[in-house]
């Protein structure tokens, strides 16, 4: 939708400002359309969580060739009240402020993307926080186990976290367990080859649960409290 809207948007915008179309500007519109097509193709195969810009920002970026063509054509930069650059490079205020000006189909496609993006990202943003301090076990494995239950992994221990998961093998494990317990945080300690004496000591420090690393990663839903 955005690619289809691009040439019409640019042509109507320039016509409305009284800019005469020449070969240089026409070629720039073709180039910009191709640039946008390439940007959107890459964007569409990028996961929603990895998308750092919006389709509208890509549309704006693709207007750079037209901006250059206008400058080379000797068009004076506008000084009217409407000349507010959305992007730093946008000397001629070409960038649309909203997808609404690109037509109903492009605008609806942009809204659908925004809703889908919000639905995908919201759980990770709104999920309760879990402080994770990994040891010998794979940090990615422990984080994945914690997040599979519905938590969001964080690296700082504070009163804002709902859960603390600490590797017993860490040199600072005892201080972290005691700190988490002092904050009233439910604390899960994991480690392999822990004997009864070690488990008793960890519980005395404030550990709510002591389990093996393999148990934690294989059955996190049985170990970690369900987020509310």
Image (cartoon, rainbow, N blue to C red):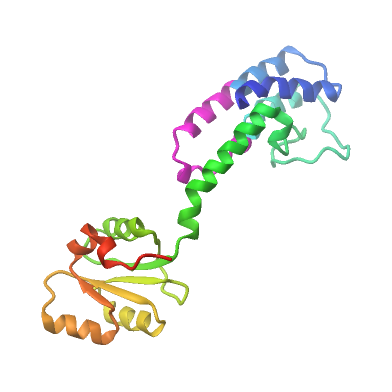
Q: Is residue 210 above or below residue 200?
A: above
| Residue in the picture at 78% in, 22% down | 12
Drawn side of residue 146 relative to residue 6, left or right: left
Q: Quadrant of residue 80?
A: top right
Q: Is residue 43 visible?
A: yes
Quadrant position of residue 95: top right
Asked if one can make out residue 53 in the rendered structure from this viewpoint, the answer is: no
Does the magenta portion include 41? yes
Q: Which residues are magenta?
A: 34-58
Residue 203 as seen in the image, left or right of residue 161: left
Residue closer to the observer: 136 or 145:
145
The answer to if 65 sits in the magenta stretch is no
**Residue 75 image offset from top left, x and y in percent:** 81, 25
Q: Is residue 52 left or right of residue 22?
A: left
Task: Tell me the quadrant of the picture where the N terminus can be found.
Answer: top right
Q: Position of residue 189 (x, y in %)?
A: 25, 73
Between residue 92 and residue 86, name the one nearer to us: 86
Report the magenta stretch's main SS: helix
Q: Residue at point 75% right, 40% down?
A: 85
Tell me which residue sits at (49%, 28%) in the image: 41
Residue 146 left/right relative to 19:
left
């Amino acid at each position: 939708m955005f690619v289809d809207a691009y040439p019409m948007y640019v042509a109507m915008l320039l016509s409305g400002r009284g800019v005469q179309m020449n070969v240089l500007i026409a070629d720039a519109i073709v180039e910009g359309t191709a640039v946008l097509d390439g940007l959107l193709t890459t964007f569409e195969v990028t996961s929603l969580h990895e998308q750092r810009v919006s389709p509208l920002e890509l549309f704006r970026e693709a207007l750079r060739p037209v901006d250059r063509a206008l400058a080379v054509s000797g068009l004076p930069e506008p000084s009217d009240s409407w000349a507010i650059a959305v992007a730093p490079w946008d000397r001629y205020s070409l960038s649309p402020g909203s997808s609404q000006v690109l037509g109903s189909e492009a605008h609806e496609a942009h809204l659908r993307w925004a809703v889908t993006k919000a639905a995908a990202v919201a759980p990770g943003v709104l999920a309760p926080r879990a402080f994770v301090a990994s040891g010998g076990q794979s940090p990615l494995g422990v984080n994945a186990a914690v997040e599979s239950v519905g938590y969001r992994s964080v690296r700082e221990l504070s009163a804002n976290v709902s859960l603390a998961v600490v590797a017993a093998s860490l040199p600072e494990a005892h201080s972290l367990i005691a700190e988490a317990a002092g904050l009233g945080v439910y604390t899960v300690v994991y480690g392999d080859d822990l004997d009864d004496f070690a488990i008793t000591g960890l519980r005395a420090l404030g550990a709510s649960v002591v389990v093996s690393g393999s148990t934690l990663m294989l059955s996190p839903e049985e170990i970690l409290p369900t987020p509310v």
